[in-house]
Amino acid sequence: MKRKQKISLVVALIISLVAATACGKQEEAQKPEGVPATEANAVLEISTVRASDPYLKFDEGEDFDNNSVYDAYEKDTGVRITNKWIADGSQFPEKLKMAIASNDIPDFFPVEAAQLQQLIEADMIMDLTSVYEEFATPETKKFMKMDGGLQMKSATFDDKLMAIPQTGNPYTGQFVWVRTDWLKQLNLPEPNTMQDLMTIMEAFATKDPGGTGKSYGLALNKTFNDGATGLVGFLNGYHAYLEQWIDDGTGQIVSGDIQPQMKDALKALQDMFKKGLIDPEFAVKDTQKASELIFGDSIGVLYGAEWTPAHLVQGAVKDGKAVQEWGVYRLPSADDKPAKSQIGLGAINYYVVSKKAKHPEAVIKLLNHWIVVDNNQTEENKVYEFGKDRVEKSSNYWLLNPLTPHNQTNDNGEVLPKAIQNKDASILTTKEHRTRYGRAMKYVEGDISMWWEYLISGPNGSLSLVPKMKQDNLFEQTKFYGAPTPTMVEKGAILNKKRDEVFVKIIMNQVPIEQFDQFVADWKKLGGDQITAEVNEWYAKNK
């Protein structure tokens, strides 16, 4: 009897092994092209490239190549991330261009929309359609289309998913930030109109409330579309939209760069420059350099995104004390028409996978896991946000995550100011709610280092302004979100460079404002008209 049982067990084992082998071959046959079969517990190694970030502070003994975030991914997903190279943030774009030009690319990496188009045309990146379909979880697929699918659509070409968009909430506009301690000192009202703001800026420049001996009215830097100390918010106050495609009222869309409203805004800036309200060296300074005048009490007004206090904290908090007071306001308008804050599609960049990558499924595994840990925080997975000690310390460890798509919709502006004001954590429902609330409450309880979070998420913070802006339709979203058109790819960079050069010369009063009209004529002739035609051809199919 025992012998028969042993024989039966052996037969059963053989049958199960045969079945498993057959099943394995069937699964292997079903895998998309380019995705090799791997053992269930095998570690998948995949390479990328990284840009350093001044806001990322490493724990002792860690760096981009060896850190607790990469270790956690390998442990939790079986994916080992390696860096082909790391470059300073300012040098990363150029180094990536060179890598693409020489076809020396890693397995996956982030690119801008124009680079995505170039990589597709060069046949250097993989069609991810089948890989995504097989390996993306239902939660991931739902998450990536919370905006109705527009951001995923922007990464799809001829029905092929060619990239994973770095999704985000599009409703992240610009605001004007003002030193409120200086308003009190000079007995000035808060800004409701552009004229109010002009009065404030003139007073700050001429009366020198910071006592530095040389003050200016408005902080600017050489990059017009920067998130802080940029120019976009000011332009929006004149209903001018930089690098934006807007409806002209006839069913066509046109470039905001060449509209009459842009000329009005540039004329206002030129007048400000003549009055000494703008640092004459702004055109050679990056954000950090331009901000030295803010941190040093020589400028008290800037335009910036909702996260601007995280930048301002460098000068606002010193030796454990808040030494500057800032207030945030909706964009003031130059006329009786409310100013709209321009916004894009919400997809910041795109993650692409090389055609040479051996394990493209590893990218989707990383994506799946990021979406889980970023939206469903537990004590264990706090490592992905704070590092190995899992403690908030303003080190921005989350920047180590190699793929960071974010929620396309949120109710931060409705929930956080109310929760913080009432000290009511019961209404918090998301990980971001709880993280921001925790930081802000530390400030309420005396931790001055969290000043910046309170100014973002608190009762009078930037997020508190967003719900009313949505309700009043005060966001101007670009009408074009397709891939760069052929002429954009060929001539867009040249046109943008010419635009920036002319705009700087106008602002600095090196050429008369009428030079804007010549710029418009040149823009049209040098490829702008062709770009407009191509964009409208796309718009006719997608509006």
Image (cartoon, grey):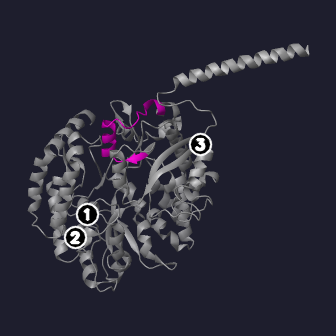
Residue 392 in view in this figure: yes
Q: Secondary structure at mark 2?
A: helix
Between residues 465 and 373, which one lies in front from this camera angle?
Answer: 373
Kindly indicate whether the residue at mark 3 contacts the one at mark 1 (C-beta within 8 angstroms): no
Q: Which residue is mark 2?
A: 195
Residue at image position (23%, 61%) is 235
Residue 91 appears left or right of 425: left
> Going from the N terminus, do you reach mark 1 or mark 3 first?
3
The residue stretch that appears in magenta:
109-131
Residue type at the position of mark 3: Thr
Closer to us: mark 2 or mark 3?
A: 3
- The amino acid type found where label 1 is placed reads Phe
Q: Which marked residue is nearer to the observer: mark 1 or mark 2? A: 1
Please say if 240 is above or below 220.
Answer: above
Earlier sequence position, callout 1 versus callout 2: 2
- Membership of 353 in magenta stretch: no
Front one among 174 and 157: 157
Q: How far apart are the alpha carbons under marks 1 and 2?
A: 12 Å
Residue labelled with disc 1: 234
**Residue 286 placement: quadrant:** bottom left
Look at the image and tell me whether residue 265 can be seen: no
**Residue 412 percent across, percent down from the top left:** 46, 55
1 vs 3, front mark: 3
Helix or strand or loop: what does disc 3 sit on?
helix
Q: From the top left corner, tell me how far across and down residue 129 is, in percent.
A: 43, 31
Query: Is residue 125 in the magenta section?
Result: yes
Which residue position holds label 3? 77
Measured in 3D between alpha carbons, the distance from the residue under mark 2 to the one under mark 3, in whole angstroms, is 56 Å
Say if 372 sits above or below 259 in the image: above
Secondary structure beneath label 1: helix
Q: Quadrant of residue 104?
A: top left
Q: Is disc 2 in contact with disc 3, using a CB cutoff of under 8 Å?
A: no
